[in-house]
């Protein structure tokens, strides 16, 4: 049984966000997350028309992969702020290029994120830059250095995505939603994840899988009581 997904926003209540990045898996996750939180993402795969596209599309913000092949950050940012001076920019950069990115952005006072990053951080930066304090659906959950994007059914450890099966994801989702510091019993996990009586040791089997993928120290066994996702 897959984890339940919270209700999403209908339509694009929060406005358009121009995403300037090449087409790859990270981009699809970015677009899906923005859409699930009420934004209207528009993907642009070339850098030469960023400013004109932002102005013409009425974008409220720009998310810019500052390391796109052929992109000249200083020129692109200058064009963007000339053509669309009130549109905030959030640049995406690698750890290796962080110092260069900060130096580039210092003059324009734009924001940046170092990849890989949790999508909740990007959403928080967007809300801050847009002055939007409306609540968003709770699609991102965190416990210590484990984070769960419930909309995309993706788990992150130390901001890095971890590949899980649907059942493994459902177990993590159940543990992270359980009250902090309280053990979740095998019976509770069986009811939440499988919805009926599984084989006798199925919970132990999946806890073992998850300890290998997330790190053994992140799931603690409380003898006679169940399991706790640490954090």
Image (cartoon, grey):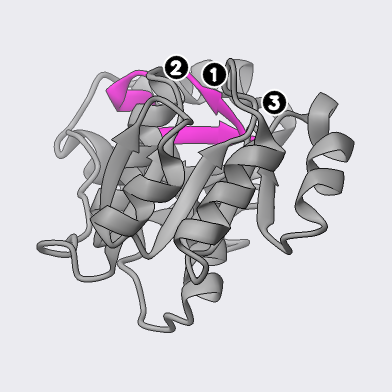
Residue 126 is at least partly visible in this image: yes
Q: Is residue 217 above or below residue 90?
A: above
Q: Nearer the viewer, residue 95 or 1?
A: 95
Residue 1 is marked as: none
Residue 115 horizontal side relative to residue 37, left or right = right
Please say whether residue 167 is one of the residues in the magenta stretch.
yes
Q: Is residue 101 above or below residue 85?
A: above
User: Which of the marked residues, 3 or 2, is nearer the chain's N terminus?
Assistant: 2
Which quadrant: the N terminus? top left
Residue 8 horizontal side relative to residue 39, left or right = left
* Residue 77 % position (x, y): 61, 47
What whole-number distance in Å separates the C-alpha atoms at marks 3 and 2?
13 Å
- How many residues crowd mark 2 within 10 Å: few (<14), some (14–19), many (20+)? few
* Residue 70 % position (x, y): 59, 17
- How many residues crowd mark 1 within 10 Å: few (<14), some (14–19), many (20+)? some
Q: Are marks 2 and 1 in contact (CB under 8 Å)?
A: yes
Please say whether residue 88 is one of the residues in the magenta stretch.
no
Residue 216 is marked as: 3
Q: Secondary structure at mark 3?
A: helix
What whole-number distance in Å separates the C-alpha atoms at marks 1 and 3?
8 Å
Q: Which residue is mark 2?
A: 205
Q: Is residue 53 above or below residue 100?
A: below
* Residue 12 % position (x, y): 18, 62
Residue 160 horizontal side relative to residue 107, left or right = left
Q: Please tell me which residue is depicted at 34% across the width and 70% down the height of the picture.
A: 136
Q: Please tell me which residue is depicted at 25% across the width and 54% down the height of the picture.
A: 57
Q: Which residue is mark 1?
A: 208
Foreground tag (3 vs 2): 3
User: Which of the marked residues, 1 or 3, is nearer the chain's N terminus?
Assistant: 1
* Residue 54 % position (x, y): 37, 53
What range of the chain is rendered magenta? 154-168
Q: Nearer the viewer, residue 113 or 90?
A: 90
């Amino acid at each position: 049984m897959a984890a339940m997904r919270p209700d999403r926003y209908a339509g694009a209540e929060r406005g358009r966000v121009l995403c300037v990045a090449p087409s790859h898996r990270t981009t699809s996750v970015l677009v899906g997350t923005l859409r699930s939180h009420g934004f209207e993402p528009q993907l642009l795969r070339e850098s030469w028309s960023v400013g004109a596209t932002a102005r013409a599309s009425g974008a409220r913000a720009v998310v810019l992969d500052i390391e796109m092949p052929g992109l000249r950050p200083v020129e692109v940012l200058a064009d963007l702020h000339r053509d669309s001076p009130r549109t905030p920019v959030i640049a995406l950069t690698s750890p290796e290029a962080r110092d260069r990115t900060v130096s580039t952005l210092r003059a324009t006072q734009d924001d940046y994120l170092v990849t890989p990053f949790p999508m909740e951080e990007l959403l928080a930066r967007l809300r801050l830059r847009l002055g939007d304090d409306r609540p968003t659906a709770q699609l991102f959950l965190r416990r210590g250095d484990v984070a769960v994007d419930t909309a995309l059914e993706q788990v992150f450890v130390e901001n890095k995505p971890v590949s899980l099966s649907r059942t493994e994801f459902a177990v993590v989702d159940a543990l992270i939603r359980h009250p902090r510091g309280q053990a979740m019993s095998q019976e509770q996990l069986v009811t939440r994840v499988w919805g009926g009586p599984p084989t006798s040791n199925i919970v132990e089997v999946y806890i073992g899988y998850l300890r290998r993928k997330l790190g053994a120290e992140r799931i603690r066994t409380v003898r006679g009581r169940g399991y706790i996702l640490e954090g």
